[in-house]
Image (tube, rainbow, N blue to C red):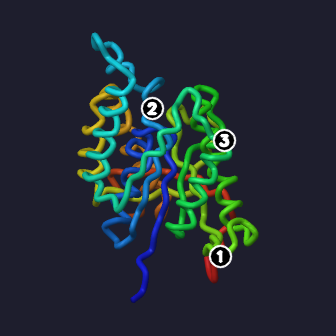
Amino acid sequence: MTRNKTALVISAHAADFVWRCGGAIALHQQAGYEVTIACLSFGERGESAKLWKQEGMTLERVKDARRAEAAAAAAALGVHDIRFLDLGDYPLDLGADAKARMVDIIREVQPAWMMSHSRWDPYNTDHMNTTQFALECRMIAQAWGHNPGQKVLGAPQLYLFEPHQTEQMGWKPDVFLDITPVWEKKRAAIECMAGQEHLWSYYTNVAENRGNHFRRNSGGQAGGRDCRYAEGFQSVFPRTVDEL
């Protein structure tokens, strides 16, 4: 039996995958991929202000709420598997134990492609540290001398999804993905994130703007096929092709 294609999204906080690549996740799940999401933290300290403003709130209650939101969003996207590593946030604890856990996940999933954050994010160093972490774990997973006997990783592309304030992050997209067919799934996932309701309209606008960029690059100045919603990504590694 042929194994399904797989993909891995490494998300610093429990909501990041929803805003930044929920469409890519839903689209590839619909196409037969098995997409695994690894949430390094719940975003319990730095990305849960709405919850902390409630009287009597505790760290564990915030974590529980964010876990429930992320799980509901993953279900809306049709996600194959979501894992919560609970590494804390602001800052993330990305030490040797965390790397060992992530390398095991990467080797288990054997992703055709991976996704994580932009390389630079001075507003939230958890994000850019996650991408360095993803790159290091990808490298370790390729090493034959790391846990000999495990299946080593090939060379999956690492796509960097769009940061929140793009013009400040040195992020330059070279891929636009049409997510119009699964937009309703992404919007449903967005609406699961009650703790960050202020971002719902923002990321809807981002998807609409990227849809415009897709159209402008798909056969001339808006002369290509229609696209209402899209996501942008920056690839890290060269692509190997047989024709252009």
Residue 32 rendering spot, x and y as whole percentages: 35, 73
Spatial distance from mark 3 to mark 2, Cα to Cα?
18 Å
SS type, badge 2:
loop
What is the crowding at mark 1: few (fewer than 14 residues within 10 Å), some, or many (at least 20)?
A: few
Where is residue 4, by image quadrant? bottom left
Residue at the right extreme, as displayed: 145
Instruction: First in sequence, mark 3 or 1: give its number.
Output: 3
Task: For label 3, count other residues whose C-alpha is less than 10 Å away and answer few (under 14), some (14-19) or many (20+).
Answer: few
Which residue reaches farthest bottom? 1
Tell me whether circle 3 and circle 1 mark residues in contact (CB < 8 Å).
no
Q: In this figure, which residue is indicated by the disc labeled 1?
A: 149
The amino acid type found where label 3 is placed reads Gly
Q: Please tell me which of labels 3 and 2 falls first in the chain.
A: 2
Earlier in the chain: of badge 2 and badge 1, it is 2
Judging by the rendered image, the residue that carries numbered circle 3 is 95
- Which residue is painted at 31% across and 67% down in the image? 30
Q: Nearer the viewer, mark 2 or mark 1?
A: 1
On the image, numbered disc 2 is attached to which residue? 43
Amino acid type at mark 1: Gly
